[in-house]
Image (spheres, rainbow, N blue to C red):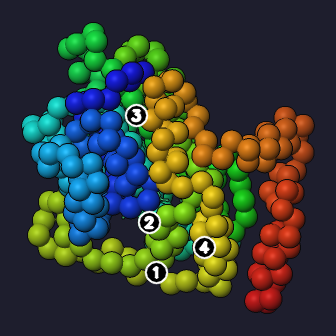
Amino acid sequence: MIKEFKDKTALITGAASGLGLEFSRRALGLGMNLIMIDIKDDQLQQASMDINHDGNSSPSKIKCYSVDVSSASEMQSLADRIRDQHDTPSLVINNAGVSGGGLVWENSAKDWERVLGVNLMGVINGVRLFTPMMLEAAKRDPNWTGHIVNTASMAGLLTPPNMGIYNVSKHAVVALTETLYQDLALVSDQVTASVLCPYFVPTSINQSFNETHSRKSLNTDESINLLDVATTFSQKIGKEMLDKAVNSGKVSAADVAIKVFDAIVQNQFYIFSHPKSLGNVQERMQAILDNKQPPNPFSKRPEIGEELKAALRSAT
Ligand SMILES: NC(=O)c1ccc[n+]([C@@H]2O[C@H](COP(=O)([O-])OP(=O)(O)OC[C@H]3O[C@@H](n4cnc5c(N)ncnc54)[C@H](O)[C@@H]3O)[C@@H](O)[C@H]2O)c1
């Protein structure tokens, strides 16, 4: 939907690291004004200085806000500020996310709150607050166009075991974004949406598996302790296996950023970092159509399934 990025505004969450940082670098490289959002304030400031230095852009092109995307009140304050102080973002990338896993019944209420809070409510908050703003801008100007990209995962299209909490959050983001696309098409030809489904890309994602830290919120000056997580045996195994998979990913975050901006110009809905891995999705869909049991998600790499089974059974 957006054909030309220069001088338009992009708002990107989870911008301090990994994919969000590379989306930010790309947006700035394409001449966009940038609003970078992350919960990690220091890392966000550093990231903005790094990308600014790379491209020698004017510092006024970048604005950073420390926001917890899972907090409705912090996101509301952010949206109020965007409305008062910035052009309406033409591009919103709801990308902040955390990792999580373990046998699905072993996740605590806090685990569910944390993973669904960031991965799902974070995206919902972005959609809820920024879509109306974009539709208003579109109404004011028939030439104005906008695009929302939500970061899901291949885990939003598959159900690999020992990471159910993450799968649930990402399936919900796929469903949310498909519906957003359909709903937008009912009311506007100027604003649309895409969903990004990355496979394994080397980033810091797995550090958030059971991370605890404190921060100051956008609304108050007091420090909040975010989380105190206990780790079960299956969560430890899940983290180890994901560490290996993420760190050995061959497609970089910068490669994914190029794909995403190309996909926006081409108005492509599903964006895949690893299109060759879609065979597993086809097997899952076929099993649904054939009314069969969920297929082995490790059919292409059975040794990984065996390793996981052996590791989990060694605990009992
Ligand atoms: N890297 C992969 O292999 C992979 C695969 C599939 C999907 N994804 C998804 O890509 C997105 C980006 O992750 P990444 O791989 O770049 O990881 P990353 O950890 O490098 O970046 C995620 C960023 O989100 C921020 N964040 C976490 N919680 C937040 C909150 N409550 N509010 C605001 N910011 C918050 C983190 O501080 C971090 O800077 C995530 O949604 C992730 O689930 C990643």
Q: Which residue is mark 1?
A: 229
Q: On screen, 1 above or below 302?
A: above
Q: Tell which circle, 3 or 4, labels the residue nearer the N-terminal end.
A: 3
Say if disc 3 is inside 8 Å of ligand 1.
no
Q: Name the image quarter holding residue 51.
A: bottom left
* SS class, disc 1: loop
Instruction: Mark 1 or mark 4: name the one nearer the start of the chain.
Output: 1
The residue carrying pointer 3 sits among few (fewer than 14), some (14 to 19) or many (20 or more) residues within 10 Å by Cα, namely many
Q: CA distance from mark 3 to mark 4?
A: 29 Å
Pointer 4 residue: 243
Q: Secondary structure at mark 4?
A: helix
Residue annotated with mark 2: 114
Classify 10 Å Cα crowding around label 1: few (below 14), some (14-19), many (20 and above). Answer: some
Ligand 1 quarter of the rendering: bottom left
Label 1 to label 4: alpha-carbon separation? 18 Å
Which amino acid lies under the numbered mark 3 shown in the image of this protein?
Answer: Ile
Q: Determine which residue is flagged by label 3.
A: 148
> Separation of disc 2 and disc 4 at Cα?
20 Å
Q: Amino acid at mark 4?
A: Asp
